[in-house]
Image (tube, rainbow, N blue to C red):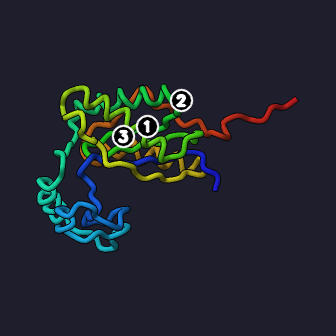
Amino acid sequence: MSVIAHHLIWTNYGTWLPNDPRGSGSQMVYTQALGELAEPHFGRREKQPSRQAVREFYKAAAPRLQYPVIRFSPTQFDEIAAAFAETIKKHQYTCYACAIMPDHVHLVIRKHRHKGEAIIEHFQDDSRLQFSSLGVVSTDHPIWTKGGWDRFLDSPTAVRRRVQYVENNPVKDGLPRQTWPFVVPYDNWPFHKSPNRS
């Protein structure tokens, strides 16, 4: 498969735990206090729990976490976006879509010399420092769950679909549609230029 872009997703600290009732990408829970709440299920559960069950799980988990759970307010979206803009500029990423949600983030990033895992790490590290500098949380607060998901996009059609999905993400949750200055329209890369003809 020839990757032309990445759909990157990661969550705020404490909002998608290894033993989340919906399933997760983890096979173990390393914190005993959290492990007492539920066994982990690797991957998405075929039968999904109710929203009430998920809320109850996280209500029980919150006091067992080392740091407070952060859910960004709309006014804090701008601070995260400012940090993302700096990361994009520093590493010369091309961003086709971005949705900053209260408890997670979506980005569509054009293929780069960095792998998806490294791109996520750069965004997380830079935004954590930026957000911590505001004094909202302690400087040692992780802000994000380390790592995330990298969905490979291998065709212009796949990129356009994911861009639309990401753009609609806030709207589905009753938030305003987001526009960020560092997001550029998808230009059909790498098929955006016609061959030279003599």
Nearer-the-camera pick, 58 or 40: 40
Image quadrant where residue 105 sits: top left
Image quadrant containing the C terminus: top right
**Circle 1 residues within 10 Å: few <14, some 14–19, many ≥20:** some
- Side (left or right) of 31 relative to 62: right
Whether residues under marks 1 and 2 lie with C-beta atoms below 8 angstroms apart, the answer is no
Q: Could you tell me which secondary element the residue under label 2 belongs to?
A: loop
Image quadrant containing the N terminus: bottom right
Whether residues under marks 3 and 2 lie with C-beta atoms below 8 angstroms apart, the answer is no
Q: CA distance from mark 1 to mark 2?
A: 12 Å
Q: CA distance from mark 1 to mark 3?
A: 17 Å
Nearer-the-camera pick, 91 or 108: 91
Query: Which badge, 1 or 2, comes first in the chain's sequence?
Result: 2
Number of callouts in the render?
3
**Residue 82 x %, y %:** 35, 26
**Residue 90 x %, y %:** 49, 26
**Residue 122 x %, y %:** 43, 37
What residue appears at the point 32 percent right and 39 percent down from the top-left corner?
A: 100
Q: CA distance from mark 3 to mark 2?
A: 19 Å
The amino acid marked with disc number 3 is Ala
Residue under pointer 3: 99
Q: Could you tell me which secondary element the residue under label 3 belongs to?
A: strand
What residue appears at the point 24 percent right and 52 percent down from the top-left corner?
A: 15
Q: Is residue 6 above or below residue 180?
A: below
Please tell me the numbered disc located at residue 92. Answer: 2
Residue 51 at least partly seen: no
The amino acid marked with disc number 1 is His
Residue under pointer 1: 122
**Circle 2 residues within 10 Å: few <14, some 14–19, many ≥20:** few
Query: Which badge, 3 or 2, comes first in the chain's sequence?
Result: 2
